[in-house]
Image: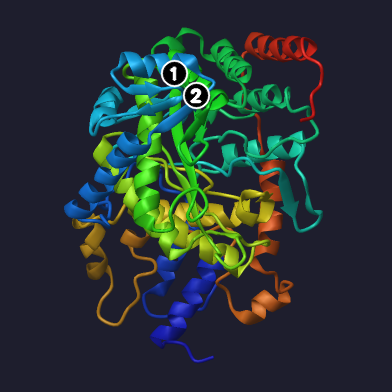
Amino acid sequence: MRLGSQKELLALETLNAITDMPAPQGRRSSARRGRLSRHNAPSESTPFTGRKIPAYDLLDETALACIESQANWILDKIGVEFRGDQTALDLFAQAGAQVDGERVRFEPGHVRALCATAPSEFQLHARDPAKTVTLGGDNVVLMPGYGSPFVSDLAKGRRYATLKDFRNFVKLAYSAPALHHSGGTVVEPTDIPVNKRHLDMMLAHLTLSTKPFMGSVTAPSRARDSIEMARLVFGDVMDRFAVMQGNINVNSPLIYDDTMSSALRIYAEAGQCVCVSPAIFAGAMGPLSPAAVAAQTLAEAMVGIALAQLVRPGCPVVFGSFHSTMNLRTGALTFGSPEANMTTMALTQLGRRLGVPVRSGGGQITASNAPDGQAMQDSTGAMWSTLLSGAHQVWHAAGWLEGGLVMSYEKFIMDLDHCGAMLKLLQGFATDDEAFGRDAYHETGPGENFLSTSHTLRHYTTANFEPRISDAGPFETWSENGALTADQRATARWHQMLNDYQQPEMQPGIQAALEDFVSERKAQMPDEWY
């Protein structure tokens, strides 16, 4: 092989950087090659410190005003029902709303005024202070999928989720730098009775992770259990700060049942975060158009936020949503569609105008039945619209398949790579003197490469986001290594993450108190499987 051409030297130095094997000398490469070999460290992830690029506004002032006017019309002319919760009805009546039976109506602007005491930004305090997150402002909090009754992986296929699966996903979320939150019902542990599984889920979140988490809302007693278990860990910190969230789903269209509204009031009374999430499938729970879905979502969410403020002014809240389009020929839900993505962007704008943190309508969501090209295409579209429009909290950022019926181990890992890439994108890039690397030009010269300059050595471990499962090598190498596809490489990755997982420490007395609480509460109830 003839040495000396710049392309040949570049190839040899790149090979040396990868394999740390000696390469023939040529021009100025020898000294710099040694320095590069000594610095051949693995890639480091740059901590996310908040979005630096501005949120994209889809709608102008006129369009936003039209949507808000329609929300006011819904609340004034149609109203929202609170079924079975006389306490909520009394609170609204005392606040000046028109209450007729279980239906509550509001004059235009009234609900928005009731929401005014909600904070625009607040912290969720974590067991490890380094894991505490801020919701609102320029912050972004990513969390795993929520609520799937099934799990899947390439070896065992699709099956009902168990407590072991739940614990696995809590461990994976804890081990993932791109996720900032442990989630809630990451999967449904179907091997545990329905009325007791919230205890095991809370125990897992509190002991296997130190990130923020969500409690149960499926019955008032389960909401209280969740708060009491959190109090065993956080003590009187909970009297001053939020450490957990409750997800309040509206029974769209325009109904709060007593389970959800009671759980909302319990979390609000305790000063814990209430996330109000209408769930509107366009054409089923509301009219077809993105504008109508946005207006109805705003109306339903504002009423829940207002109730939280009536219970406890200043209660931390999140304006949430969950929406999708439908295949109007078959009735099947679709995710990642342009109409749903535009609705996400509009709702983020509306939430920011309301002055509260915004939870997106979905992160990396898909209707696909496998972690395939369709899954990643749907997910990428949904995630881009979510993050670029300025959402503060992203649920379902990892693992979602089959419209939420399944949490996939492989897709969880594939989604983590995309989460990391998007977080890097949101931070933009610097344009200071160091970023321009002028010293590197002095070390080299026209026609020479920059691979081993001092500037490169200072930054090459953090300069570029490095996905964990992507394969950018040549076809021949890929083929010799088994021609593994992305989902197959993800299998090895999630197994390795679980193998490397180390449980965070907890004071023995607190651990024992949690376990005793779970045992005592389970002993007080017969098993219920429905």
Looking at the image, can residue 401 be seen? yes
Residue type, label 1: Ala
From the viewer's perspective, is residue 236 above or below residue 526?
Answer: above
Query: From the viewer's perspective, is the residue at label 1 or at label 2 nearer?
Result: 1
- Residue at image position (38%, 27%) is 104
* Dot 1 crowding, Cα within 10 Å, few <14, some 14–19, many 20+: many
Residue 117, quarter of picture: top left
- Tell me which colouring the rendered structure shows: rainbow
Residue 367 located left or right of residue 389:
right
- Residues at badges 1 and 2 in contact (C-beta under 8 Å)? yes
Q: Nearer the viewer, residue 142 or 119?
A: 119
Instruction: Give the percent coordinates (x, y) of residue 399.
Output: 61, 50
Q: Which residue is mark 2?
A: 261
Vertical relation: 28 (above or below) 143: below
Q: Name the residue located 70 percent from the left edge and 63 percent from the top edge.
A: 488
Residue in the picture at 39% in, 35% down: 301
Between 131 and 398, the one lying in front of the other is: 398
Q: Quadrant of the N terminus?
A: bottom right
Q: Which residue is mark 1?
A: 88
- Give the Cα distance between marks 1 and 2: 7 Å
**Residue furthest bottom in the image:** 2
> Dot 2 surroundings within 10 Å: few (below 14), some, or many (20 or more)?
many
Task: Quadrant for the C terminus, please.
Answer: top right
Q: Residue furthest front?
A: 100
Q: Is residue 45 above or below residue 505?
A: below
